[in-house]
Image (spheres, helix red, strand yellow):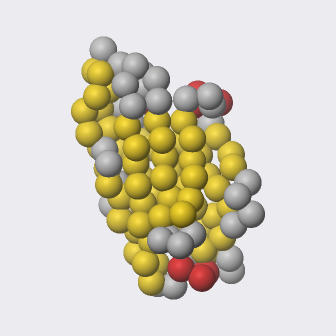
Amino acid sequence: QVQLVESGGGLVQAGGSLRLSCAASGSIFSINVMGWYRQAPGKQRELVANINSGDNTKYADSVKGRFTISRDNTNNTVFLQMNSLKPEDTAVYYCNAIFRVLGSAWGQGTQVTVSS
């Protein structure tokens, strides 16, 4: 099993920055892709960014050029650096891990609120 623990959410003004962290523990060798999703009130959960074991990244169009995903394999942690934040970035952000064989895991979520 894999456990994911997020941190770094909070309240920030528009134009500000936040850095989210997600620490993975357990059967980390089984992880292929790690990423961040978000869910705003009344909306579906959507992919924000992910990074695979080859360090290939994928971003939602809405965050390209503002957000950067990275991973620290030594400490089994993935980061999401969020710059130039907008009120529409307000959501609960969830860390996700996709396993090499089958299945995935989710973190508990961290709230990001961007005030205008």
Residue 11, x across and y down, in percent: 25, 33
Query: Does 19 sit above or below residue 77?
Result: above
Residue placed farthest to the front in the image?
A: 74
**Would residue 83 appear left or right of 16 to someone viewing this image?**
right
Q: Nearer the viewer, residue 63 or 83?
A: 83
Q: Nearer the viewer, residue 94 or 24?
A: 24
At 28% from the left and 28% from the top, the residue drawn is 12
Residue 104 seen by the camera: no
Query: Does 112 sit above or below residue 85?
Result: below
Residue 98, x across and y down, in percent: 60, 68
Q: Hey, which quadrant is residue 64 in on the image?
A: top right
Q: Nearer the viewer, residue 29 or 104?
A: 29
**Would residue 111 appear left or right of 93 to someone viewing this image?**
left
At 50% from the left and 59% from the top, the residue drawn is 78
Residue 61, x across and y down, in percent: 65, 30
**Would residue 58 appear left or right of 17 to someone viewing this image?**
right
**Would residue 5 appear left or right of 66 to someone viewing this image?**
left
At 60% from the left and 82% from the top, the residue drawn is 29
Residue 31, x across and y down, in percent: 60, 74
Query: Does 61 sit above or below residue 53?
Result: above
Residue placed farthest to the top in the image?
A: 116
How many labels sit on residues? 0
Query: Does 30 sit above or below residue 109?
Result: below
Residue 63 seen by the camera: yes
At 30% from the left and 14% from the top, the residue drawn is 116
